[in-house]
Amino acid sequence: MVIIMYPLLLKAPLKDYLWGGNRLREEFGFESEKDKIAEAWMLSCHKDGQSVVVNGKLKGKTLSEAIEIFGNDCLGEKSKAFPYFPLLIKLIDAKDRLSIQVHPDDEYALKNEGEFGKTEMWYIVDCEKDAKLIYGLNKEVTSEELNEKIENDTITDICNFVPVKKGDVFFIPAGTLHAIGKGILIAEIQQNSNTTYRVSDYGRLGADGKPRQLHKKQASEVIDKKPGKSEAKKNTSITSFGTLTELATCKFFTANLINLDGSTTIRNEKSFVSILVLSGECELSYGKEKLKLQKGSSVFVPADFGFKISGKAEIIISNI
């Protein structure tokens, strides 16, 4: 059976990590039998959690299965630079602070973990007053000093703590020590990797009653020992359909924020497009077909596929 390519509305796999809250349930409408919803993987082909198609002829298929049926042309020419699906996009609700951690680069991860590394970007969807996160180090350190801080669990002495507010953007290259702080809701665009090296977890116990695993040796080998650069620069322009803000552009992904107030037509000839609705309501139309989107909707649009999006909503558009 031949399936004509079309935009795929996705259902996210949900994660109940111990630091998570319930904003994704209460404000975004995600349903789960778990007590907490820490993360929703809004666009995922990762083995640890696959997005599932909920519309059209491919309803019930995983995103990976749908892409295999469509064929690799649906990913676009730029995807040829990657041996597997390149992006993982999440919503993260940190009711409590996350572990202090770091992700390796491609070379280290491929050699030691069998998958690519992880460069990522955070967009602060919302946060509590006086919320902070960790971004890199507050000074340059030697390998000896770094190892001493890791071993003695005094790493916070050299962490760069940054106050955050709604709308802030942080670009986090692989090797950057980081941690999402308490009371922060984040949209994360990242390489398709789940390799994380924990440096410190504040002595917390996991679901099994034991301290969560740390990865001190690996972390010490990949942490960038120079100070972090803090918040990324944003470029915003006024358009006929609202405002367009450039959040991040790198060799792994591009992400833009659209505060939509009207309608615009989008077609990316060289890459698939991810649409993540953070607030409001809008409609995605193509030909005679229409998709109603709301807060928490996620759509995969095949490469070189034209569509119109209309309404009043806050949307992150990602591609490679």
Image (cartoon, rainbow, N blue to C red):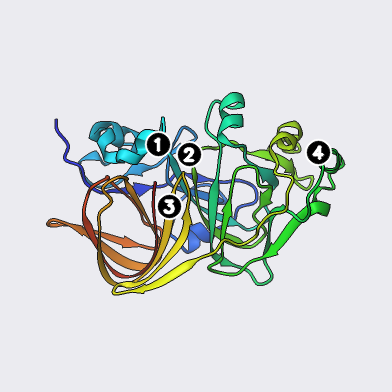
Foreground residue, 150 or 253? 253
Specify the amino acid type for callout 3.
Answer: Thr
- Residue behind mark 2: 192
Place of residue 135 in the rendered image (x, y in percent of width and height, measured from the top left): 67, 55
Q: Residue at x 58, y 30 (%)?
A: 107
Mark 1, mark 4: which one is toward the viewer?
A: 4
Amino acid type, residue under disc 1 in the picture = Phe
Circle 2: residue type: Asn
Query: At numbered mark 4, what does the secondary structure look like: helix, strand or loop?
Result: helix
The first of marks 2 and 3 along the sequence is: 2
Left or right of 2 on screen, residue 196: right
Q: Is residue 165 above or below residue 267?
A: below
| Pointer 1 with pointer 2, Cβ within 8 A | yes
Q: Which residue is mark 3?
A: 254
Q: Say whether disc 1 or disc 2 marks the residue closer to the N-terminus.
A: 1
Instruction: Give the vertical position of 261 relative to 107 (above or below).
Output: below
Residue positioned most to the left: 288
Mark 3 Cα shell of 10 Å, populated few (<14), some (14-19), many (≥20): some
Q: Residues within 10 Å of mark 4 (few under 14, many from 20)?
A: some
**Residue carrying label 4:** 143
Q: CA distance from mark 1 to mark 4?
A: 35 Å
For marks 2 and 3, give the one nearer the viewer: 3
Reading the image, the residue beneath label 1 is: 85
User: Marks 1/2: CA distance?
Assistant: 7 Å
